[in-house]
Amino acid sequence: MKDAKIQQAYEAAKARYAEIGVDTDAVLEQIAKVSLSLHCWQTDDVTGFENPDGQLSGGIQATGNYPGKARNIEEVRKDIEKVKSLLPGNHRLNIHAIYGDFGGQKVDRDQIEPKHFQSWIDWAKANNMKLDFNSTSFSHPKSGDQSLSNRDKGIRDFWIEHTIRSRKIADEMGKQLGDKACHNLWIHDGSKDMTVDRYLYRSLLKDSLDQIFAHKFANVKDAVESKVFGVGLESYTVGSHEFYMGYAVQNGIMCTLDMGHFHPTEETYDKISSLLLFTPEIMLHVSRPVRWDSDHVVILNDSVQLLAQEIVWANALNKTNIGLDYFDASINRIGAYVVGSRATQKAFLQALLTPISKLRQYEANGQLFQRMAVLEEAKSMPWAAVYDYFCYKNNVPVAEDYITEIEKYEKEITSKR
Ligand SMILES: C[C@H](O)[C@H](O)[C@@H](O)C(=O)CO
Ligand SMILES: [Mn+2]
């Protein structure tokens, strides 16, 4: 797009938004501070560097076989750098424990140390990024159907050790990068068929968590992520929403709300205000479930828009850690990041551009038709011109111009893998 056109469109949008009492320049400053935590695992379909030929387990699946997936740490970093160059704003990187710099050595999960992630910290520093971290319970010989809730104490102890070490690594990331790292704990534990011992597994999980969180780390923000079910574990999930919500409230930690981890018609946005009254912050996994937790690439759909509105309207941007979580192996993976990240930013931008004071006034006055009308009109206001200008000001491709850039990277880099 031509520079003059972008600027003219922005000026027209600015004038139109001013008519409804919204200052687009102020919104541009706010959206620039909305940082996404890019999930490293879209680069390689959640393979990691421990066992590149191993099977993905834990009830999650990356389907598709699009060429060019990252095969090693250098390729993951190169791809993330490319993604970063196509996104406006400053973003974080979210790393799973299986993405350590193990130097070709076999380092089991109960042996990981900050030194295995030092090169990530150095890379993040060099790229002006902050880091977040996740323990990894899946794709391991000891994963089975249960990890932290296993009846076998030996298995539980193995995963307790892994998770404490993961939090220690997050602490080191937070310390060296000068910004607390979110540590997210998601485990796949569950049961394919009916169980008659629901209470037992949940009490074992609670005990494991108590041991894990007895270790205090100053530079970590802890989060626990629930799920409805995983493939092969359909009848019971130990870490349900009720379980983790109770645990998070009792222990003053965060819940991670993954948009694919609730019943298909259950929306995530309505949980924000309830959680924030009882927990310090929240973590999001912005995703797109299609019939199940399919982890499709995020698009600008109603669920993401409603979620962003709720966070902005609850004045909770500074209490929300926005992670992405999807992995589509059927399309260009750099494109998957850029489309999903931009869609997420657009949802937050739209929410910031909505005249919320006016809407609240209407609601308080009982002017409900007027409230509905303004919400409807907000959908067709010229927010896209504001997003284009945001990209332009940040020197990243505007609108669909990123397609050519990604095609070029594919031709020169990923297609040669
Ligand atoms: C890689 C996983 O998707 C991730 O760790 C977890 O957050 C999840 O959502 C599992 O369904
Ligand atoms: Mn998730």
Image (cartoon, grey):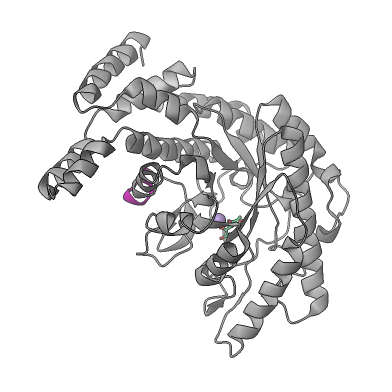
Which of the four quarters of the rendered structure image does ligand 2 lie in? Answer: bottom right
**Residue projecting furthest to the top:** 4
Q: Residue furthest right?
A: 105
| Residue at x 69%, y 78% (from the top left corner) | 204
**Left or right: where 270 falls relative to 185:** left
Residue 312 seen in the current view: yes
Q: Nearer the viewer, residue 234 or 274?
A: 274
Q: In the rendered picture of this protein, how many numbered marks are placed on residues?
A: 0
Residue at the extreme bottom of the image, as rendered: 196
Q: Is residue 351 magenta?
A: no
In which image quadrant can residue 103 be found?
Answer: top right
Q: Is residue 201 above or below residue 108?
A: below
Q: Residue at x 46, y 47 (%)?
A: 297
The residue stretch that appears in magenta: 300-304
- Residue at 53% in and 53% down: 64
The quarter of the picture where the C terminus appears is: top right
Relative horizontal placement of residue 121, taking residue 188 as reference (left or right): right
* Residue 70: quarter of image: top right
Q: Nearer the viewer, residue 309 or 102?
A: 309
Q: Main secondary structure of the magenta part?
A: helix
Query: How far from the left and from the top, in percent, is residue 310?
Result: 37, 48
Q: Is residue 253 above or below residue 315?
A: below
The residue closer to the viewer here, 37 or 235, is 37
Image spot of residue 349 (x, y percent): 37, 34
Asked if residue 140 shows in the view, the reply is no
Q: Position of residue 120 (x, y in %)?
A: 75, 37
Please name the residue shown 71% across and 43% down the image. 71
